[in-house]
Amino acid sequence: MKERNPSGESPEKKAAGIAAADLVKDGMVVGLGTGSTTAYTIAELGRRVAKGLDIIAVVTSYQSEMLAIDAGITLTSLAEYPELDIAIDGADQIDAALNVIKGGGAAHTREKVVSRSAERFVIVADESKSSEQLNHYVPLEVLPYAKELVLKQVRMIGGDPVLRLASRKDGPVISDNGNFIIDASFGVIENPVVMSALLSQVAGIVEHGIFTNVDEAYIGKKDGSVEILRS
Ligand SMILES: O=C[C@H](O)[C@H](O)[C@H](O)COP(=O)(O)O
């Protein structure tokens, strides 16, 4: 499994993350995603807030909460603002139809709630995330109590599930919601909508990492340009 390196500088991620900040206007309520690419968006929004941009934001994780506080962005909650103007978030893989897989940082449950609460859902990513079809493992947030049942059910629908283990803690990764993460490989996912529906029926899965509700994707390229794709 590929190691995550959230602190490594990436010009492609930076270009995409900063370009998407242009979509955020005065008066908006903004959903802030999680991960190394969204971190550039949050930092850029912080710079614009310091210059007078008037926004409030809802976070998707402890990571984005810490980054937003550091950036000086005023935070609110979905309880106070259940309808967001825009959500901007990263992705682990994006297919040609803008279906995405998320959750490499175990944040996909809150990210899905925030994305579905937003009028416009925008992905920011570097070009290495693009793929004609989805074949990345699908992160599953799972109730610890249901681990064995979920492993069995995922195998029954053709998946190869692996419990995600922590790297600087003994034992499993625990999500921001107190749950386990199981990474399930299915090879090429021919129909992401069908796979999404199948996984939603598995008892014990709190949420899976397939998102089929992306409106736009900002893809940062090695030459510093940003390609904007719309669904
Ligand atoms: O759980 C984490 C999120 O879904 C991230 O948005 C996703 O893993 C992409 O992260 P990054 O921008 O660091 O590649």
Image (cartoon, rainbow, N blue to C red):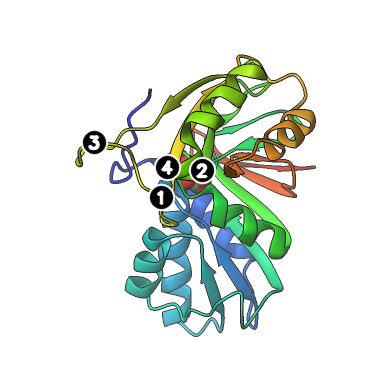
Check disc 2 and give the amino acid type: Glu
- Gap in angstroms between the C-alphas marked 1 and 3: 14 Å
Q: Quadrant of residue 133?
A: top right
Kindly identify which residue carries mark 2. Answer: 141
Element carrying mark 3: loop
Q: Label 2: state its secondary structure.
A: strand
Mark earlier in primary sequence (1, 2)? 2
User: What's the residue at 43%, 48% (across, down)?
Assistant: 179
Sequence-wise, the earlier of marks 4 and 3 is 3
The Cα atoms of the two marked residues, 2 and 3, are separated by 18 Å
- In the image, taking residue 117 as reference, residue 32 lies left or right, namely left
> Mark 1: which secondary structure?
loop
Label 4 residue SS: strand
Q: Position of residue 77 (x, y in %)?
A: 55, 77
Circles 2 and 3: CB atoms closer than 8 Å: no
Residue for badge 1: 175
Quick check: marks 4 and 2 in contact, CB under 8 Å? yes
Disc 3: which residue: 167
Along the line of sight, the residue nearer the viewer: 128 or 174: 174
Q: Residue at x 31, y 43 (%)?
A: 9
> Mark 1–mark 2 contact, CB under 8 Å?
yes
Using the rendered image of the protein, determine whether residue 36 is visible from the camera's viewpoint: yes
